[in-house]
Structures are given as C-alpha cells and as structure tokens.
C-alpha cells in the first residue's frame, strides 16, 4: 500500500525529476575539474555524485522499483543532453562560447556516455533481485 496520494506522487515526480537532472548535469560537469585534498587527487564531481543515490532511493521508495527504473531512465536522456551542452559550453571550467555547441567534444561526450552506462549497468544486478 502506498502512503502517498496521487497529488503528492505527481509533485514528487516533478521534484525528483528536476533533482535527478540537477545532480547528473552538475556531476558530469564537475568531473572535469580536478582537486587535490590532503594529497588525494579527485574531481569536484566526487562531491556531487553521491546525491544521485539519494535521488534514486527516494524515487524507488515513492514509486516502487519497476516504475522508478523507468522514470530514472527517462530522466537520463535529457540529463545527458543538458550535461553535454553545459560541459561543452564551460569546458574545463572556461567559457567556450556558443560556438562550442557547433563542434563535437569527444571528452565531454565520453563523460556523458560513461555516466549513462554506469547507471544502466548498475541496474542489471538489481533487476534479478527484485
């Protein structure tokens, strides 16, 4: 039995979709920016990416695993397109101008594809446990 009303679920769908978009886009952009903390080399994306687990968990709890998987997959496509655009415009933290959208940036595209594949492959083991 789901404790949420239809109105609450619709509002949650909008907010969770926006949260997924924000986390995926920001993480895919921030992974370009390296940082060193106490001798450890990482990227700023390492700090924003864990929020995707929060977003995914909330989506599963509210909508159930099968529907949540479809919702998240549907959000991934626009999130990757938006993250590619943002990352190409601000490549390596520098404004490249709108002309950057006219050329293909392999580095940024690899980040977007890797992000999608990490999510998709991460869902395979879960499917067999449900």
Image (cartoon, helix red, strand yellow):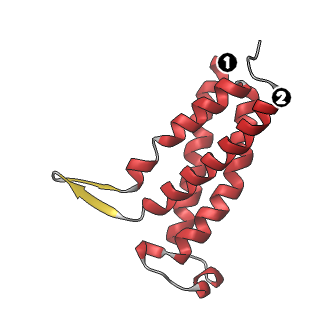
Give me the residue at 59% from left, 66% from top.
Answer: 84
- The residue that mark 1 highlights is 130
Q: Secondary structure at mark 2?
A: helix
Q: Quadrant of residue 89?
A: bottom right
Q: Residues within 10 Å of mark 2 (few under 14, many from 20)?
A: few
Q: Which residue is outermost to the left?
A: 38
Q: Secondary structure at mark 1?
A: loop
Q: Position of residue 82 (x, y in %)?
A: 64, 64
Could you tell me which quadrant the N terminus lies in? top right
Q: Which residue is outermost to the right?
A: 6
Q: Is residue 111 above or below residue 57?
A: below
- The residue that mark 2 highlights is 6
Mark nearest the camera among 1 and 2 is: 2
Q: Position of residue 114 (x, y in %)?
A: 54, 54
Q: Is residue 7 above or below residue 120?
A: above
Q: Position of residue 55 (x, y in %)?
A: 58, 38
Q: CA distance from mark 1 to mark 2?
A: 24 Å
Residue 104 lies left or right of residue 26; in this view the side is right
Q: 43 or 62, which lies in front? A: 62
Give me the residue at 74% from left, 27% from top.
Answer: 66
Could you tell me which quadrant the C terminus lies in? top right
Counting residues from the start of the chain, the first of labels 1 and 2 encountered is 2
Give me the residue at 76% from left, 31% from top.
Answer: 8
Q: How many marks?
A: 2
Q: Is residue 69 above or below residue 74?
A: above
Residue 41 lies left or right of residue 115; in this view the side is left
Q: Quadrant of residue 124?
A: top right
Q: Residues within 10 Å of mark 1 (few under 14, many from 20)?
A: few
Q: 113 or 69, which lies in front? A: 69
Give me the residue at 75% from left, 22% from top.
Answer: 4
Q: Position of residue 52 (x, y in %)?
A: 53, 41
């Amino acid at each position: 039995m789901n404790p949420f009303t239809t109105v609450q679920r619709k509002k949650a769908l909008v907010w969770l979709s926006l949260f997924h978009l924000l986390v995926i886009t920001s993480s895919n952009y921030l992974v370009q920016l390296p940082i060193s903390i106490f001798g450890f080399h990482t990227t700023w994306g390492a700090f924003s990416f864990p929020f995707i687990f929060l977003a995914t968990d909330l989506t599963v709890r509210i909508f159930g695993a099968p529907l949540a998987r479809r919702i998240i997959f549907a959000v991934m496509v626009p999130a990757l397109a938006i993250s590619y655009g943002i990352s190409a415009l601000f490549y390596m933290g520098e404004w490249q101008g709108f002309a950057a959208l006219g050329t293909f940036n392999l580095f940024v595209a690899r980040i977007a594809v890797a992000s999608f594949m990490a999510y998709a492959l991460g869902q395979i083991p879960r499917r067999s446990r449900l």
